[in-house]
């Protein structure tokens, strides 16, 4: 299934082919468990490491419409009305327009202002 991977460390946003199931999501994100932020354009969601802030992250990004800085990798998928994850239809360029990468100092300053 088509997904968009956001890598905060390399500041890269790219399309990937994701296998079905939560284990494939964990593998793509490099984590043990993930959480989801909804409300992205056209029924898309951002999945990210649920423990990402616990390991002293150094690399961050923000996504338009969400107030807090996000750490580690993120994965964008679409979802059905029933909540099932399906292939992303957003383009890499559309996702790039939603993402701003942050330095550690910028993420700390943003978190203090929230």
Image (tube, grey):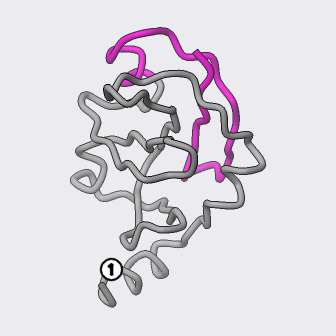
Query: Is the residue 96 above or below the residue 24 in the image?
Result: below
As drawn, the residue found furthest toward the bottom would be 113
Q: Residue at x 36, y 12 (%)?
A: 21
Q: Which quadrant is the N terminus positioned in?
A: top right
Q: Residues within 10 Å of mark 1 (few under 14, many from 20)?
A: few
**Is residue 12 left or right of 1 when viewed as pictured?**
right
Image x and y of residue 34, in percent: 28, 35
Q: Is residue 4 magenta?
A: yes
**Is residue 20 left or right of 92 when viewed as pictured?**
left
- Dot 1 lies on which element? helix
Nearest the viewer among 20 and 12 is: 20
The residue at which mark 1 appears reads as 111
Q: Residue at x 39, y 73 (%)?
A: 67
Q: Which quadrant is the C terminus positioned in?
A: bottom left
Q: Report the magenta residues as a range.
A: 1-27
Total labels: the figure holds 1
Which of the 4 quarters of the picture holds residue 24?
Answer: top left
As drawn, the residue found furthest toward the top would be 20
Nearest the viewer among 83 and 98 is: 83
Image x and y of residue 70, in percent: 41, 60
Image x and y of residue 89, in percent: 66, 32
Q: Residue at x 25, y 28 (%)?
A: 32
Which of the 4 quarters of the picture holds residue 5?
Answer: top right
Q: Is residue 38 magenta?
A: no
**Is residue 65 left or right of 53 when viewed as pictured?**
right
As drawn, the residue found furthest toward the front would be 81
């Amino acid at each position: 299934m088509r997904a968009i991977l956001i890598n905060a460390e390399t500041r890269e946003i790219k399309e990937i082919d994701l296998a079905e199931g939560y284990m494939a999501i964990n593998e793509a994100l490099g984590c043990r468990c993930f959480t989801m932020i909804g409300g992205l354009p056209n029924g898309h969601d951002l999945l990210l490491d649920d423990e990402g802030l616990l390991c002293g992250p150094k690399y961050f990004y923000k996504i338009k419409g969400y107030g807090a800085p996000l750490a580690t990798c993120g994965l964008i998928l679409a979802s059905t009305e029933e909540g099932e994850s399906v292939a992303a239809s957003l383009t890499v360029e559309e996702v790039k327009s939603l993402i701003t990468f942050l330095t550690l100092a910028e993420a700390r300053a943003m978190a203090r202002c929230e």
